[in-house]
Image (spheres, rainbow, N blue to C red):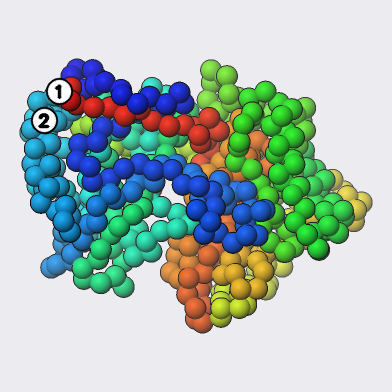
Amino acid sequence: MAAAAAAVAVAAAADACFEVLDALGLCRLTRRTGDLDGAVPLRVAKACVPLLEGNAFGHQITLARPIEVQRRLGSLRAEPVGEHREALLRAHRAALPRLVSQGFLAPDGAWHRALRGGLAWTCRTGLGRPRLRLWTGLLVRPDPGVWLRVAGAANRRNVLIEVSEAYLADERAFVPLVVELRVRDEAPQILRLEGEIGCLAPVRPGVRIEACALADAPEVGRAHAEFYDARYFAVKKGEVTRKYRRLVGGEAGARKGRAGEGGAGEESAREGDAGEGSARAGDAGEGSDAGEGSAGPARVRLVVAGPAAPEIAEVTEVTTAAGPDPVPWRGGARRLASLVVRNAVPFRATFDGHTLAVAPEAPRLAEGAAAVERAFARVFGEDFIAANRGALWYLTKYFTPHPPGEPHFFVKPWAFTRTPPGWSSLLDGIHGEGYDVMRGVVATDVFFATPAVFHVRRLGAPIEVPEGTPLLRVLPIPRDLLRAGFREARFLDA
């Protein structure tokens, strides 16, 4: 791949952390505005910073030309349509020998063989459902110390497709950017795809997550109570408090390494908002101090305060220049860890266009709430509980509604996530039947909750979410990567 390494960067952003070669003109990488060009409700635009950050997260993989996906005899096919169809097919035929001759693809290698069959091909695992691998026409190469994460679009997306999560490791080679998608049963036999079909984002390996009890990180519980004080609830009754915005802004200005816009938290509902308080700079707990400027792995603390503690997971497979099938990652200490948040209380929720009614399993909710209160009482004492009843109620009630007319509510896991200075957390929703869990970004170095915000898509009939259902993947990310761009590479004979 020596020739590929010599590709010329023609448009290098100062904050670039990966390269992109466009071989076809089929897709481009675009950035969203936080308010989705004015599409989000005014209340959200004014207050809900985590959602705005989630809207703007990453680079959207955007079709410049429409594609039609056809289901036929257990397989999937995809072809460009419209006036540019023939031009794209010619470009595809011309691109492959060019990519091979210039070292971007190994001749007759797995990638070359796969792409030779067309823009897309069907894959399946065992007797599983067919999935479509669609080549975007792009090749990408992350910088050393950076991986690229491929996932679905979020908060505004085509709900008839589901995109598989994939990771591209920093192995100093260009890799074709492929979106692997599943077509849902309710989709038509011929499905037209346009616009945003996925999201590409840089992430940093070398993240280690350690779980601990609330007793081992009391500053986190204390910060929750200090944030949700009596004055907070008094102000919240009539207006947006903007307390999160002030909190994150103040911490960002006070501590080096937090300059600029970060993933912040702000109020997003009538009774409370989507986050927690902040521990002071001097309260940094053990295991949360390796971050920006540190040679070691980023150490993240999962502080457990009740039942259904999130699971710590690691990426075990990556996609490389060897071929389109993921291979085991053997990078030793350079691991990428995340948290999987599961539902603690089984419930049903119904939206009728005006009211969103949540019906939890009451005994299970009461058991979980009592366990959380006992954990706080053991650490802080009964006097603390009495003095901070509102803060404990906010956490233990688990569900928080949004205003009438909105098909949204959120749940608050009974655990907190604390990242090193300068690190935020991506909250990537895991969707279910009739609902999405929305994407957000939270500055978890000062603000420790990881709420799962539901968007109910089903009208009139309830959604059902059993206990143990996965709701979120929480992925720690340094904030410099949230704003990072890319360099445009070109063919050597361009």
How many marks are shown on the rendered structure?
Answer: 2
Question: Which residue position is annotated with label 1?
Answer: 493
Dot 2: element = helix
The N terminus lies in quadrant: top left
Residue 30: mark in rendering:
none
- C-beta proximity under 8 Å, tags 1 and 2: yes
> Looking at the rendered structure, which numbered label has been put on residue 98?
2
Q: Residue sitting at 62 percent across and 77 percent down?
A: 355
Placement of 72 over or under 236, stated as above or below: below
Q: Amino acid at mark 1?
A: Asp
**Residue 310, placed above or below residue 296:** below
Q: What amino acid type is highlighted by mark number 2?
A: Arg
Q: Position of residue 485 (x, y in %)?
A: 43, 32
Horizontal side, residue 182 vs residue 33: left or right: left
Q: CA distance from mark 1 to mark 2?
A: 9 Å
* SS category of the residue bearing label 1: loop
